[in-house]
Structure formats: structure tokens, C-alpha cells
Image (cartoon, rainbow, N blue to C red):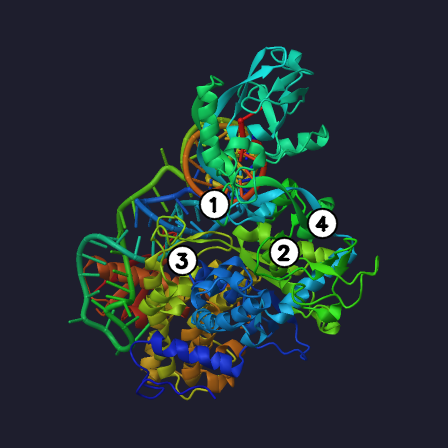
RNA sequence: GGGCUCGUGGUUUAGUGGUUAUAACGCUGCCUUUACAUGGCAGAUGUCGCCGGUUCGAAUCCGGCCGGGCCCACCA
């Protein structure tokens, strides 16, 4: 049963203003309780499944969330209304660093103070409360998602799926462990992946340092990182560079440290940069790594995992990188070894999470081998329909630039553990049995002795997975991969992925990687990419800038429907600037919808919809326009173009329906005695159908107010418990009539002429016109006669007379009018 | 340096070849008309970023330039 409407007064006397604060929570509760749009696993209706983004459990719902989830929900609701079996779950991402911090703050203890399994249990417990609140926030947007399909990326099921994924890839030979230079964050003290890098412009010093050759010759090398001197393993010059090519083959002494390194010629040394002589250190940048491999140079590790100088740095040991940089430069200067130091700006790679400059350290890490599969990933991207299409370009651009396999091990404590041990005796890797999953190897042991050497002593892998290694499995998680194979087969690939453009490289790409590797198929048929919510000046909203606007506040001030209306004003993929104006516009539209529907229903009370044989001209005009609109809206929705729907539906409703049609139909409504029964029936049918259809067109965008109006006036007649379950309107081609549209257009033009006349004279629109004389040809006369009655009634005109005319006429009307009061 | 994207009245924006360029907000004047003054009617405001080309015809297609944004690369 639909809830009682809590306003005083009956259905007929619905109040003057719609109150979203009473209505919205009521319907949200109703939808959840009634399971409106809930997935039915055994139904054979067409399935539409959505891979929705699980928000991080750490903070609250911000404007960007509200914006993105609304756009997704509009699409979901459209499919629900079309009668599809919509699979629309909602998950929480609670296995990342942000959640770890959140839980630590909440319990006042560090994660490392307890066994890992205990911390995971604590997280499951603590985040449960937080998720209840988050659910309320998200629900307050009026999302139609199915909360019974909820998942959490740290729950047992997700950990199991994640570990299974690892094991399958390992068995396929797609996972390997390697001791090699990797991207390292000294602040977070973990390896990271290429995708976690970001640019940062930094102030720096360009130093020119004096190196002495063994034969006494002196050369100048340029560097921004003098602290790497103890890790210098070679000097490079370009063999084409006539200034320096003679140096090749000689040896140089590293200043302050005194040992000798070879001078090598390589095309990668850029004569244009600095002095054209560059030192190669292990490892200052990626070129260093290349040279180190190519020329089999020695490995000198000057930097520790915590970002301090190593033993190798001698007296500089223990200094932080930046301190060492300063100190070494000072010592070079005092020994006359520093030729010059010029301040400069350059961009460096930093860890996107903490902003720390990354280093290249040699550590033992697990990788997913995928650089050999770039082509396949690009092909996979091309099999998916991207909305908007151009977003695929950034996906391909990213793949083309990939140069590292996916490093998935993190030297962190909290996360999904690697399901494996190493044999203490022979080093063999022992993978957990499937029945052990999810497993924490620091808590359990392999079930059998080492198959290679028979030893029963094992060392657990203590690293955890990159959080994206788990969140890239959302389709597998939701579709019960390897747990319910018939369900998985039926549901995979999913219909749609929804996400932001900022994580194409992360989430979309990684999910396609996992999908391709595990199923050899793309994970979804289509993908919709939303933009960002920016502040009113187009800047990113950020807590630190203090320019964030709380969605809850805006919903309190206006309504969830108003917020959704704003969110529907930006095309998919476009960023949106916050604009309070849109909220005002929405509130006015809602008021107009409320009042127009109240008016309509008042005058067709007790009416049971019955389609007439013939329509009055003006009704035929309305219905023709309406059916064109329905067609256009459906096409627009199918193309993810809800902006078009919003625009067209609003214009049609406000101007064509309210300003023109309702004004013209009022005479029939107020003075039914002057009309025939069929003329009255025609009006009632047109009013009923048009109003209901428009409500349905607006329903995906503004689900609450449309539901409220539907429940008051339509649910009984339509025999539906919700507008969202009442079916999507289908266009009636037979009602589309260019002739009717032409006649309606003529009536509107003439009424407009009358209004112009009254307006220019400062008259009330009620003023009676004694005569409207129209000059036009005979064909036009005939047309005007068909709408004469409507014009007279609407324009308060007593008489319309015609005069023959063959000359110059008003183009829009092919007629000329003279008006007499 | 590469890729993508945007540039239309004061503001936001529709419009991907066809008569006079869309609408909203704001602005001006009028109208207390029995759904709504959170309303209605009327009006003012545009060299459609700049230059060139294709075309009978360009906001729209092509080329170049200028300016904004995003992503990637480089980063001695």
C-alpha cells in the first residue's frame, strides 16, 4: 500500500505548495520497502545490470558523489520504467588506506597494534555503522538501487574473490615476483603502481658539478639531484656531440666520494640539456634504469626505503634526501667542485595520495604481467560502447603510455593478504588451497608440506594487494564468479559500468584487465563516464580550499529533486559548475508541476480515461507534439542524453502545455455547457494523457515529486503502485499529425497577436476584443475557421472577420491582423 | 611534446550546413486572468573566439591561430 499523504486535506484539495521534506523521505522508504525496481533473478524480462562505483568508506557524501550517482540513477530509473529487470547493487569500498585511517581514528588505536585478522574484523564492525549513515546519505538522493545486493570490498566474499583472482592469474603465469627497480613512496613506505603517480611542479636547483678525469681533465655535469653522487655508476655523453665524444672510454672520478666510473656514449644523452654530460645513478629516473640494464652497470643503493641516505652515502648516512641534497651541495661548493647553481622549476612525479616525490628502489614485488597485452586491452575498449565516445581516447592514450607491469603488492598492513607462503628451506612458493580462502597467511599455514623439499616450515607473504586489485573485480564480486556459475554466465558481461573520467586509468582499465584475463571477454557492454562537480567559478571543490558545498545542505534548503535537476543539466562526461540558480529553477518547475497537475485533476475528477474517436483540433495539436516529444526523449535516453530530455520536457510542459494549451482549453473546462460531450471528452483525454506522460518523462530525473503527484491522481486509475512501475510511455505514431500541428500553430500565432496588441496598449489580457479582422488568402481562412472558437475564447474576441489579401503578409502567419477593442 | 575537450547576448546554455540563431537566469514595461505572482504577456541585449578555405549558402565542414580545461609523456 502507498503511504497516506500526510498533508491535511483530501486528494482533491491538495495543498498549494508541495513540501519535499515530507514527501521525499516518505517515498524513499516506500521504494525500499516495496522493492520498486528490485532485481528478480528468476524473471525472464530483459536484464539491465549496472556496475556501480562503491564509494570509499571514510568521509561523507560530497557534491561530486551526489552529481555522479544522480546521473547514473537517472539512467537506471529509465530502464526500470521501461520494465527491464534491473540489477542495480550498491557497494562500499572499505579496504583502502582511507578506511584504515578512518577506523584507526574511530577506535583510537593503530592497525599495527593488533593481528591483521583482528583489524579486519574491527573494520568490518566499525564500518558497518558508518555504512548505515552513508546509506542514508545516498538514499536521500532518491537512488533506486537495490540495497539487498550490497557488498563491501573487505567482506569475506570480496576477499575470497580477490584471492581467487590472484591464484588464477598465478596459475596462468600472469603473476610474477621480481626483485627489480620499482616505484616507491618513501612517505608511505610501499611500492606503488604507475597509475598512482601524478605531476607536481617543484622549485629546484640545477647544479653544475666538476668531475675530474683520471688524466686530470675536468668536465662539468648537470644534475638536480647531487645527493645521488654516491650512487653514480657511469657518465653519459651523446656520441654525436663533438664537444664531448672524445671523453668516451675514459674514466671520471666522482667528487667527494673519489671512486671512478666509466664514460659511455649513448644516443639518449641529450646534448641540449645542461652541459650535455649526464651522470647515471641507481636510480634517479627511468633512463638510469634503462642504462643500468643495457650496460650491466653495478647497483649502488644510496637511498633507504624510508627516504634517508644509506651506508653508501658515508658521512651523509641517515640524512633525509633533501637534507643530503643541501649538505652535499654545500660541501661541493666549499671544495670548489660546484661550478654553478641555478634555481629552476621542473615537474616531478609524486605519489598522488601523499604528494611525496617518488623514488626508484630495488625491492621484491609481485606484478601482473600485462605489458604484452596492450593490443588486447585496446581491442577490449573498442568492443565497449563509451558514453561519451571520446572518453575511449583517454583509455587508449593511457594504455599506449604504459611502461610498467602492474605492481600489485603493497608493503602495507591492512588490505587483502596474498594467499601464499614461501618454503623456509627451498624458497618454493606455496599457494593456498581454494577451500582455505579467504586466508591470511600470517594466521594459517599450508595444508601440506612443501611439494619440492618436504619441509613443513613456511614464511608467510606479509604484503597486501593494491586496493585496485580488488576493486577491479566488482563485476566478478557482484556476479558470484566461481561461486554460482550459472548466475555468472547469465549475467556476464554486465550492461553498464558507471564511473568518473578521473579513474578511467584506474578502475575502468583495471577492471577490463581482470575481465580480459579471467573471462576473455569485456566486463560490460557499455560504459558511462561522468564529469566532476566544480564550484561556481569552475574550480575543483576541496576541503582545503573551503569551497565545498554540502549536498545535504542543498537538499535541506531545496530538495533532492532540485539537486537531481541540477545534476541533469550537465551532459554526460562534462564537468558541472555549482549553480544555485539551477536549484531555484528546479523548485519553480516543481511548483509548476504541482499546480498544473492539481488544475488538471480537479477538472477531470472521476474521469476514466477513454480514447476518443476524434480529437478537437487543439487537442490533436497537443497530442501530436506530445508524441513527438516521447519519441525524442526515448531516443535521447537510449543515448544517455538526459540533458536533452530535461530541456525538451521542461519546454514542452511549461510553454506548450501550460502557457498555450491549458489557456486554450480553459473555456471548455469552465463552460462545459457550451460544448458537446465529445468535445469535452477530447479535452479530458488530452489533459489526462499529456499530464501523465509528462510526469513519466520527468520521473527518472525528479522521482519524488512525480511519484507524489502520481500517487494522488493516477495510481488508482493506472493500477500501479508507483510511477516507476507504471511503464514508460510509448509514442503513438497515429497521433503525430503535421496538419494538426499547423492548425495549432496558427491558433497560437493569432492569440499571440492579440496578446501583443493588449500588451502594447497596457491592457489586461482579460480585455474583450470586439473584432479581429484577418487579411489572408482563402486557404488560410479555412484553416483559421477550424480554430476560430479557440482563438475567440482564449483571446476574448467577439468576432473574427476575413478580408481577401494577395499582397505582403506576416511571414509566420501568412496573414495580417487588425484589432478593434 | 602527444592525446582529448571547450570557446554562441551580462551569466549558464541549445543548436553539426538551409529562410529572421534556442532557451533559462538577470534586465525593462505591462497584466492582482477562478492551477501557479515560485505566475502571465510583451520588450531590449549576440561581429556564434580570430583568420583563411570548401559551398549557391557556414555557428555548424576543412586548415591555421588565440584562449580555457583535463589526461599522458618528459622532468640532467
Label 1: which secondary element: loop
Q: Which residue is tagged 3?
A: A777
Q: Which residue is tagged 4?
A: A177
Mark 2 and mark 1 residues within 8 Å of each other at the beta carbon: no
Chain letter belonging to callout 3 = A
Mark 2 and mark 4 residues within 8 Å of each other at the beta carbon: no
State which quadrant residue A80 falls in: bottom right
Q: In the picture shown, does residue A82 fall above or below A249?
A: below
Which of the marked residues, 4 or 3, is nearer the chain's N terminus?
4
Q: In the picture shown, does residue A32 fall above or below A550?
A: below
Q: Which residue is tagged 1?
A: A355
Which of the marked residues, 4 or 1, is nearer the chain's N terminus?
4
Which of the marked residues, 2 or 4, is nearer the chain's N terminus?
4
Q: Nearer the viewer, residue A479 or A93?
A: A93
Q: In the picture shown, does residue A533 fall above or below A239?
A: below
Q: Could you give the CA–CA distance between mark 4 and mark 3, rounded to whole angstroms?
A: 88 Å
Amino acid at each position: 500500500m502507498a503511504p497516506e499523504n500526510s498533508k491535511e486535506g483530501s486528494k482533491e484539495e491538495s495543498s498549494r505548495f508541495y513540501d519535499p521534506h515530507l514527501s521525499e523521505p516518505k517515498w524513499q522508504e516506500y521504494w525500499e520497502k516495496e522493492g520498486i525496481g528490485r532485481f528478480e533473478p528468476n524473471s525472464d524480462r530483459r536484464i539491465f545490470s549496472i556496475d556501480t562505483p562503491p564509494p570509499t568508506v571514510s568521509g561523507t557524501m560530497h557534491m561530486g558523489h551526489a552529481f555522479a550517482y544522480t546521473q547514473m540513477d537517472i539512467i537506471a530509473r529509465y530502464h526500470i520504467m521501461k520494465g527491464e529487470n534491473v540489477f542495480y547493487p550498491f557497494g562500499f569500498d572499505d579496504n583502502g588506506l582511507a578506511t584504515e585511517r578512518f577506523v584507526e581514528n574511530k577506535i583510537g588505536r593503530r592497525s599495527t597494534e593488533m593481528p591483521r585478522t583482528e583489524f579486519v574484523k574491527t573494520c568490518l564492525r566499525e564500518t558497518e555503522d558508518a555504512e548505515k549513515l552513508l546509506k542514508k546519505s545516498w538514499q536521500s538522493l532518491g537512488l533506486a538501487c537495490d540495497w539487498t545486493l550490497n557488498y563491501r570490498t573487505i567482506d569475506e566474499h570480496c576477499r575470497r574473490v580477490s584471492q581467487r583472482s590472484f591464484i588464477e592469474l598465478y596459475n596462468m603465469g600472469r603473476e610474477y615476483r621480481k626483485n627489480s627497480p620499482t616505484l616507491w613512496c618513501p612517505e608511505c613506505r610501499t611500492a606503488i603502481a604507475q597509475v598512482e603517480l601524478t605531476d607536481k611542479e617543484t622549485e629546484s636547483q640545477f647544479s653544475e658539478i666538476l668531475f675530474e678525469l683520471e688524466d686530470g681533465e675536468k668536465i662539468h655535469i648537470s644534475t638536480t639531484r647531487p645527493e645521488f653522487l654516491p650512487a653514480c655508476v657511469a657518465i653519459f655523453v651523446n656520441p654525436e656531440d663533438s664537444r664531448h665524444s672524445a671523453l668516451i672510454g675514459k674514466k671520471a672520478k666522482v667528487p667527494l666520494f673519489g671512486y671512478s666510473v666509466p664514460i659511455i656514449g649513448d644516443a639518449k644523452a641529450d646534448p641540449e640539456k645542461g652541459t650535455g654530460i649526464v651522470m647515471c645513478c641507481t636510480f634517479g629516473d627511468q633512463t638510469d634504469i634503462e642504462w643500468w640494464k643495457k650496460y650491466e652497470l653495478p647497483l649502488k643503493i644510496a637511498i633507504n626505503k624510508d627516504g634517508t641516505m644509506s651506508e653508501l652515502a658515508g658521512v651523509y648516512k641517515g640524512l633525509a634526501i633533501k637534507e643530503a641534497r643541501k649538505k652535499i651541495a654545500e660541501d661541493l661548493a666549499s671544495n670548489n667542485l660546484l661550478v654553478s647553481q641555478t634555481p629552476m622549476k621542473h615537474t616531478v612525479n609524486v605519489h598522488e595520495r601523499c604528494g611525496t616525490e617518488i623514488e626508484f628502489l630495488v625491492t621484491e614485488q609481485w606484478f601482473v604481467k600485462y605489458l604484452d597485452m596492450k593490443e588486447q586491452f585496446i581491442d577490449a575498449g573498442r568492443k565497449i560502447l563509451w558514453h561519451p565516445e571520446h572518453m575511449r581516447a583517454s583509455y587508449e592514450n593511457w594504455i599506449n603510455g604504459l611502461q610498467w607491469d602492474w605492481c600489485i603488492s603493497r608493503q602495507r598492513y591492512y588490505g587483502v593478504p596474498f594467499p601464499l607462503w614461501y618454503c623456509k628451506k627451498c624458497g618454493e612458493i606455496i599457494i593456498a588451497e581454494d577451500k582455505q580462502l579467504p586466508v591470511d597467511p600470517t594466521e594459517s599455514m599450508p595444508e601440506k608440506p612443501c611439494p619440492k623439499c618436504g619441509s613443513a616450515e613456511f614464511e608467510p607473504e606479509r604484503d597486501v594487494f593494491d586496493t585496485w586489485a580488488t576493486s577491479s573485480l566488482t563485476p566478478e564480486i557482484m556476479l558470484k564468479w566461481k561461486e554460482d556459475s550459472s548466475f555468472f554466465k547469465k549475467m556476464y558481461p554486465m550492461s553498464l559500468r558507471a564511473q568518473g573520467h578521473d579513474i578511467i586509468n584506474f578502475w575502468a582499465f583495471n577492471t577490463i584487465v581482470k575481465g580480459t584475463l579471467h573471462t576473455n571477454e569485456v566486463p560490460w557492454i557499455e560504459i558511462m563516464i561522468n564529469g566532476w562537480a566544480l564550484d561556481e567559478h569552475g574550480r575543483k571543490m576541496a576541503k582545503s580550499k573551503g569551497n565545498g558545498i554540502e549536498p545535504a545542505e542543498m537538499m535541506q534548503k531545496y530538495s533532492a529533486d532540485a539537486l537531481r535537476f541540477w545534476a541533469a543539466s550537465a551532459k554526460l562526461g562534462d564537468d558541472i559548475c555549482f549553480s544555485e540558480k539551477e536549484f531555484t529553477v528546479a523548485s519553480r518547475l516543481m511548483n509548476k508541476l504541482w499546480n498544473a497537475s492539481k488544475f488538471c485533476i480537479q477538472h477531470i475528477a472521476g474521469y476514466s480515461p477513454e480514447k476518443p474517436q476524434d480529437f478537437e483540433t487543439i487537442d490533436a495539436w497537443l497530442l501530436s507534439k506530445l508524441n513527438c516529444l516521447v519519441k525524442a526523449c526515448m531516443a535521447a535516453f537510449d543515448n544517455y542524453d538526459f540533458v536533452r530530455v530535461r530541456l525538451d520536457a521542461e519546454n514542452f510542459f511549461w510553454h506548450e502545455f501550460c502557457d498555450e494549451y491549458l489557456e486554450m482549453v480553459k473555456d471548455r473546462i469552465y463552460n462545459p455547457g457550451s460544448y458537446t460531450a465529445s468535445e469535452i471528452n477530447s479535452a479530458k483525454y488530452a489533459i489526462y494523457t499529456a499530464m501523465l506522460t509528462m510526469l513519466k518523462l520527468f520521473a527518472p530525473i525528479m522521482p519524488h515529486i512525480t511519484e507524489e503527484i502520481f500517487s494522488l491522481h493516477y495510481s488508482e486509475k493506472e493500477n500501479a503502485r508507483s510511477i516507476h512501475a507504471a511503464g514508460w510511455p510509448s509514442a503513438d505514431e497515429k497521433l503525430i499529425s503535421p496538419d494538426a500541428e499547423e492548425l495549432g500553430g496558427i491558433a497560437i500565432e493569432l492569440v499571440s497577436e492579440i496578446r501583443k496588441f493588449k500588451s502594447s496598449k497596457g491592457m489586461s489580457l482579460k480585455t474583450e476584443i470586439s473584432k479581429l479582422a484577418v487579411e489572408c488568402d482563402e486557404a488560410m481562412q479555412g484553416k483559421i475557421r477550424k480554430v476560430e472558437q479557440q482563438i475567440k475564447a482564449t483571446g476574448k474576441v467577439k468576432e473574427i472577420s476575413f478580408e481577401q489579401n494577395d499582397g505582403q503578409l506576416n511571414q509566420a502567419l501568412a496573414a495580417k491582423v487588425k484589432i478593434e477593442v
